Image (spheres, rainbow, N blue to C red):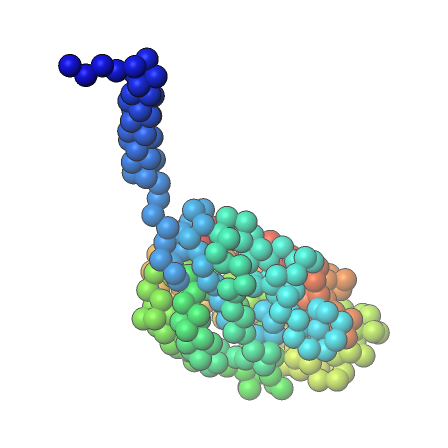
Amino acid sequence: MIVTTWAQRVRARRERWWVVVLAGLAVLALACEGGTAVPAPTGEPGGGGGGLTSMAALGDSLTTAFASCLAPAPCPRNSWSTGDGTRVDSHYRRLLKANPGLKDHARNAAQGSARADALAGQARAAVTAKAGYVTILVGANDACRPGIADMTAPDTFRRQVDEALAVLKQGLPQARILVASVPDIHRLWEIGHTRDVAVKAWSFGICQALLAAPTSTAPTDVARRRAFRERIDAYNTQLAAACKAYGPRCKDDGGAAHRVAFSLDMVVAQDFFHPNAAGQNALAKATWLGPPDW
């Protein structure tokens, strides 16, 4: 006969109680695990679940935020897409709130003088970065040539954009792509050609297909500006069509960037052409379509 003391009986009851508690916690843990979304792998968007771990931006000096830090040089911290500075509520900063793994993993592959023929090379950089979200803003330099005859033809532009998208589809098949429209550069001429300071800045050679002889009313100059505007519209048509052909993982901005009503206080004073921090912020706001979970 085994005699148990009062202390032994109390200890036994406590041990049984802890077994019950631990078993309950195990069941609860299993239930919670079954209801939790699995984080997306590196390079794939994770919606609002914190799974996006890398993004990339392709394009030209509009995306490098040229001269937005006063010096005539790229200032990527102010980029509408990947900027991490406090002056612009960029796509990167918006996404970082729900995707902490994205921190310090935003690759700005844009190049200052890039035209559409440079996109495929930039797309390869996005593939190397395993980007889960890629923004594209290109076309300004294809139009801003010495003259109308020098501008990229719309069909050539489309082919070059398609080549870049093909690189992304092959290398990043799960990535979400945002194709932004080309901003309304013609508007800068409309609001600036009566301002001496803007006219003086443009005389140093920026975007001459549009901004040469900005005060001239000669029929040839009027026709040149109209042709420039029509070419930008043609590029935007091709950008939207290319994105649609890519499939459901690509979205265009529906012309949002083109509709941004730039004022002269939204562009840098050095050239009255490139967006300053306020202009970059306007682009970020206009092109933001929400978390890239489409």
Expressed as whole percent of the image width and height from the top left, the position of residue 2 reads 19, 16
Name the residue nearer the viewer: 106 or 276: 106
Decide: is 293 above or below 74: above
**Quarter of the figure with residue 123:** bottom left
- At horizontal 76% and vertical 83% (from top left) the residue drawn is 203
**Quarter of the figure with residue 15:** top left
206 relative to 92 in the view: left or right: right
Expressed as whole percent of the image width and height from the top left, the position of residue 16 reads 28, 22
- At horizontal 61% and vertical 74% (from top left) the residue drawn is 61
Name the residue nearer the viewer: 211 or 25: 25
- At horizontal 51% and vertical 64% (from top left) the residue drawn is 105
Image quarter hosting the N terminus: top left
- At horizontal 33% and vertical 21% (from top left) the residue drawn is 11
Whether residue 284 is visible: no
Whether residue 63 is visible: yes
Expressed as whole percent of the image width and height from the top left, the position of residue 17 reads 32, 21
157 relative to 259 in the view: left or right: left
43 relative to 181 in the view: left or right: left
